[in-house]
Image (spheres, rainbow, N blue to C red):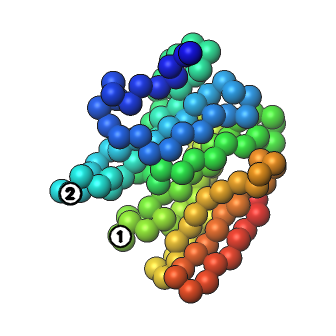
């Protein structure tokens, strides 16, 4: 048995984990701030190379815990994640991150009645960006 990540050595609570399609990278979210009651307020995203065990130098700040990997147009690995709105904390922005490269904003929900959720089809072929409120939901397939 190989330990890929030991939460007790992080000094933070884990949120979500996702292994890249080529099984070379592990992306994980961990708390970067907590409320007075101990509930997570924000998560940061860290990416670890599973072959070398090295943590990539880039850290993505202020994300929601759910992460989804996909293949990029050039065959490389792409990480999708959601960032909260700075004013109200709701899940408002869908971002694409290429390890070692720049991040791109793909979708922003400005209506405060709605928030984004991220999922993937069971065959992992399609990324689903769900825009949800307490009354309605719409899905964007990427």
Q: Badge 2: how crowded within 10 Å, few (<14), some, or many (20+)?
A: few
Q: Is residue 31 above or below residue 113?
A: above
Residue at far bottom of view:
135
Spot occupied by residue 53 in the image (x, y as percentages of width and height): 53, 16
Q: Which image quadrant for residue 74?
A: top right
Spot occupied by residue 136 in the image (x, y as percentages of width and height): 61, 83
Q: Which image quadrant for residue 127?
A: bottom right
Residue holding disc 2: 37
Residue 106 can be seen, yes or no: no
Q: Is residue 36 above or below residue 71?
A: below
**Residue closer to the observer: 39 or 109:** 39
Residue at far left of view:
36
Say which quadrant the C terminus sits in: bottom right
The residue lying at 47 percent from left, 26 percent from top is 5
Q: Is residue 105 left or right of residue 41?
A: right
* Gap in angstroms between the C-alphas marked 2 and 1: 21 Å
**Residue closer to the observer: 2 or 93:** 2
Circle nearer the viewer, 2 or 1: 2
Q: Is residue 37 left or right of residue 47?
A: left
Residue 29 can be seen, yes or no: yes
**Residue closer to the observer: 137 or 93:** 137
Q: Secondary structure at mark 1?
A: loop
The residue lying at 58 percent from left, 31 percent from top is 26
Residue holding disc 1: 87
């Amino acid at each position: 048995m190989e330990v890929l990540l030991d939460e007790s050595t992080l000094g933070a609570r884990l949120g979500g984990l996702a292994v890249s399609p080529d099984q070379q990278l592990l992306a994980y979210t961990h708390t970067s701030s907590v409320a007075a009651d101990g509930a997570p307020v924000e998560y940061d995203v860290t990416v670890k190379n599973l072959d070398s065990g090295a943590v990539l130098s880039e850290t993505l700040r202020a994300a929601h815990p759910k992460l989804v990997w996909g293949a990029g147009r050039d065959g490389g690995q792409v990480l999708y994640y959601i960032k909260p709105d700075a004013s109200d904390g709701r899940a408002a922005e869908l971002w694409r991150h290429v390890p070692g490269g720049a991040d791109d904003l793909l979708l922003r929900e400005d209506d405060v009645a709605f928030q984004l959720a991220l999922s993937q089809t069971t065959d992992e072929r399609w990324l689903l960006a769900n825009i949800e409120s307490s009354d309605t939901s719409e899905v964007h397939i990427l």
